[in-house]
Structures are given as C-alpha cells and as structure tokens.
Image (cartoon, rainbow, N blue to C red):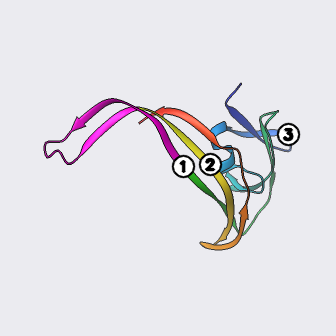
Amino acid sequence: MNSSFKILCNGVVLETIERDKIYDEAHPNAVWIHMGQQYLVKEVNENLQTITVIRKDMDYYTKTMKEINVSNIKEEERIVYSDNHCSLCKGALTVTRHIWGYKVMKDDQVLEIHNEEFPSTSINTKG
C-alpha cells in the first residue's frame, strides 16, 4: 500500500503527506497551512488515501496532544567517551506516535480541548 495521502481541495491535489504524519498534521478539524493559506481539514479517507480540505481563514490554529515512544532499539554501534560518563549509540529503532486529541489555540492560549483517539502510527528508522 502506498504510504502517502493526497490532500485535496475542490478535487485539486495541493500536496501529499506521509501516512505516519496524517493524524499529527491533518486530522479532521485541523487547521492546515499550505503556501501561506489556511485550510480546514474536513475528512481523512483511509480507503482512498485522501484528505479533503476547504479553504478558510481562521483566527486560531490547532495543536495535537501526543505521545511519542521509541522502542525495539537494536544497537549497531557505540562510542564511549574518554570520561566513561557518556556514550553515543547508533542503530535501528521503531518510533510510535499516538495522537490522543488536539487543542484549538489562539495567541498561545487554549480555547478548546478535544479528546479524540486517532490511529497510532509507527515507523522503523535509524537513530
């Protein structure tokens, strides 16, 4: 399955977004910015891999409430510094993002809190 979603406004593709970022950046009712213009996310369609937005000027923005976990760390390399108080490791890991809601914000003030569970997403990467 393709890992990106098309962001559509009036049937026109504005941009694509990776699957692991959709609920962080373009969840339903999110304020989404494209080329300096505001859009309101109306729908995320997992089957069609599309996100439908409408052009709308708003005096607020949205910010997700999330938890990010790093797991399945497989160390491939380690550098221990001479004082033995610090080391640097490199290897494979899994990053899981769980979005459990979003805030409606204006001028860094919380206007509303929406507790809403979105699907968790995970990516395998190196770090």
Range of the magenta residues? 68-91
Q: Are marks 1 and 2 in contact (CB under 8 Å)?
A: yes
Q: Position of residue 7 (x, y in %)?
A: 75, 41
* Label 3: how many Cα within 10 Å (few below 14, some 14–19, many 20+): few
- Residue 105: x percent and y percent? 66, 69
Residue ranking furthest to the front: 72
Which residue is pictured at 21% across the width and 38% down the height?
A: 80
- Which quarter of the figure has residue 111? bottom right
| Mark toward the start of the polypeptide (3 vs 2) | 3
Few, some or many C-alpha atoms within 10 Å of disc 1 (few <14, some 14-19, many ≥20)? few
Badge nearest the viewer, 3 or 2? 2
Of mark 1 and mark 2, the one earlier in the sequence is 1
Q: Is 56 in the magenta? A: no
| Prevailing SS of the magenta stretch | strand
Quarter of the picture holding the C terminus = top left
Q: Where residue 73 sits in the image (x, y, percent)?
A: 43, 35
Q: Residues within 10 Å of mark 2 (few under 14, many from 20)?
A: some
Proximity of marks 3 and 2: CB atoms separated by less than 8 Å? no
Quadrant position of the N terminus in the picture: top right
Q: Is residue 38 left or right of residue 70?
A: right
Three-letter amino acid code at the position of disc 3 = Gly
Indicate left or right for 21 with 68 as reference. Answer: right
- Quote the CA–CA distance across marks 3 and 2: 29 Å
**What residue would you read off at disc 3?**
11
In the rendered image, the vertical position of residue 67 relative to residue 112, given as above or below: above
Per the image, the residue denoted by label 2 is 98
- Choose top left, top right, bottom left or bottom right for residue 20: top right
Q: Secondary structure at mark 3?
A: loop
Q: Read off the residue under disc 1.
A: 68
The disc labelled 1 sits on which kind of residue?
Ile
From where the camera sits, is residue 36 visible? no
